[in-house]
């Protein structure tokens, strides 16, 4: 992939695929602008080189031209962050959009409307990609979070920029840091994998068996592993069809001499609520009427010991239902341990929306070596899969 460091862009129109798929509240206020901020270095570099910046992105999964998923609020926020006006175009293709772009001068910025207002975007449609390509002279992909999708704006479009397609600063930074995990990790290497279901993390767990010394399992998926080992987990979430797979993963970990660490105790409640009384128990002996919603103090101590002795730490997924204050302690404790390990010299990388949200909730998002902007894309890259958007830039 070619970077943008040597690009000459005077009077060039530059189409930048960014990932502005940010969370909005019911009033369309941005609740987390991290992804917008992450794109700023590339935008500023193009402006400095006297290029005209044309930004394209998706937001959510609109079934039609849903005004609640318009990128207009993002244009306003970006203007504030850059201290420069960002023009907003009400469409991403068509005569009006082209007219809006033609009014721009070198150094100006325009953000086009939600790409997914058109079903052709996710279909990877050639005609749609060609219309997008007609808007600019140069194409830059800086949207790592979408790199695992073969969409029109990330994959198909590159065929129309054979000699003028580049990777942006964020995309470059993501690959550099992920390669520190994938190809240059220092031992001991500990991976912390959480979340509700094994099914969404099978590939990354199996891939990490080839690379890590320790894999820590937390979150809802832990109860499937515990039940597979004969434990009684009450009404806790369990993927019954993944019990055999869980036992297989445990066996493969032994064959690879990887320590697969499961929680030993659980914080329970009678219902999925922050208002019920809580109790703790051995994770293999959860009362029938209870639901396990977080790891207990003994598990935290065990997890911390492994994390603090590591030189490389990868974290993806919470340890419990951290959105509820009564069940946030496990995730907060692990988050703090990863930060402490980083402070002690380890390289740490976290990724995935829940992990990042948890880190911000703890006020610790600055305590890691690197925070990846791509959840699914990050996992796919670490699994060794070919990412369509990266392949298209090569």
Image (tube, rainbow, N blue to C red):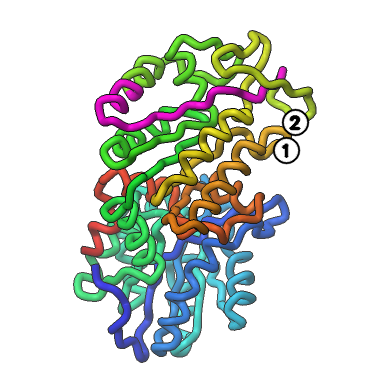
Nearer-the-camera pick, 255 or 315: 255
Q: Position of residue 148 (x, y in %)?
A: 34, 50
Separation of marks 2 and 1 at Cα, in angstroms: 7 Å
Nearer-the-camera pick, 12 or 225: 225
Residue at (42% x, 82% y) in the render: 45
Circles 2 and 1, Cβ within 8 Å, touching? The answer is yes
How many neighbours does mark 2 have within 10 angstroms: few (below 14), some (14-19), or many (20 or more)?
some
Q: Position of residue 321 (x, y in %)?
A: 63, 34
Answer yes or no: is residue 115 visible. Answer: no
Nearer-the-camera pick, 271 or 262: 262
Q: SS at mark 2?
A: loop
Residue 134, compared with residue 19, is above or below; it is below
Query: What residue would you read off at disc 1?
Result: 325
Q: Earlier in the sequence, mark 2 or mark 1?
A: 2
Give the quadrant of the N terminus. Answer: bottom left
Give the quadrant of the C terminus. Answer: bottom left
Residue at (72% x, 21% y) in the render: 279
Does the magenta-highlighted stretch encompass residue 266?
yes
Residue at (41% x, 89% y) in the render: 50
Q: Is residue 15 left or right of residue 73?
A: left
Q: Position of residue 31 (x, y in %)?
A: 66, 56
Q: SS at mark 1?
A: helix
Does the magenta-highlighted stretch encompass residue 203?
no
Magenta-colored span: 249-270
Q: Is residue 184 left or right of residue 230?
A: left
Q: Position of residue 329 (x, y in %)?
A: 66, 38
Find residue 274 and name its label.
Answer: 2
């Amino acid at each position: 992939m070619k970077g943008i460091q040597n690009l000459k862009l005077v009077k060039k129109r530059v189409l930048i695929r960014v990932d502005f798929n940010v969370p909005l509240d019911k009033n369309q206020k941005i609740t987390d602008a991290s992804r917008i901020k992450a794109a700023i270095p590339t935008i500023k570099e193009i402006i400095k080189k006297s290029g005209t910046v044309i930004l394209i992105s998706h937001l959510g999964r609109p079934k039609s031209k849903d005004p609640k998923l318009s990128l207009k609020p993002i244009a306003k926020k970006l203007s504030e962050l850059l201290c420069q006006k960002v023009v907003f175009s009400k469409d991403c293709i068509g005569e009006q959009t082209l007219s809006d772009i033609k009014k721009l001068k070198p150094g100006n910025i325009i953000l086009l409307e939600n790409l997914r207002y058109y079903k052709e975007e996710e279909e990877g449609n050639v005609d749609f990609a060609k219309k997008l390509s007609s808007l600019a002279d140069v194409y830059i992909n800086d949207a790592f979070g979408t790199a695992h999708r073969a969409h029109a704006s990330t994959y198909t479009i590159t065929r129309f920029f054979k000699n003028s397609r580049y990777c942006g600063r964020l995309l470059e930074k993501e690959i550099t840091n992920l390669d520190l995990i994938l190809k240059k990790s220092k031992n001991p290497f500990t991976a912390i994998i959480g979340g509700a279901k094994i099914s969404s993390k099978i590939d990354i767990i199996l891939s990490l068996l080839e690379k890590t010394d320790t894999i820590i399992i937390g979150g809802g998926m832990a109860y499937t592993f515990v039940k597979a080992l004969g434990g009684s987990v009450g009404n806790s979430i369990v993927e019954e069809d993944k019990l055999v797979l869980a036992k297989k993963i445990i066996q493969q970990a032994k064959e690879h001499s990887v320590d697969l660490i499961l929680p030993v105790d659980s914080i329970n409640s009678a219902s999925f609520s922050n208002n019920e009384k809580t109790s703790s128990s051995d994770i293999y002996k959860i009362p029938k009427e209870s639901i396990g919603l977080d790891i207990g103090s003994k598990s935290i101590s065990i997890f911390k010991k492994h994390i603090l002795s590591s030189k490389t730490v990868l974290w993806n997924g919470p340890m419990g239902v951290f959105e509820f204050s009564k069940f946030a302690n496990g995730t907060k404790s692990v988050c703090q341990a990863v930060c402490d390990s980083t402070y002690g010299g380890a390289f740490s990388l976290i990724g995935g929306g829940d992990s990042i949200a948890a880190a911000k909730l703890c006020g610790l998002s600055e305590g890691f070596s690197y925070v990846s902007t791509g959840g699914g894309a990050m996992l796919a890259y670490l699994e060794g899969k070919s990412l369509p958007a990266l392949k298209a830039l090569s």
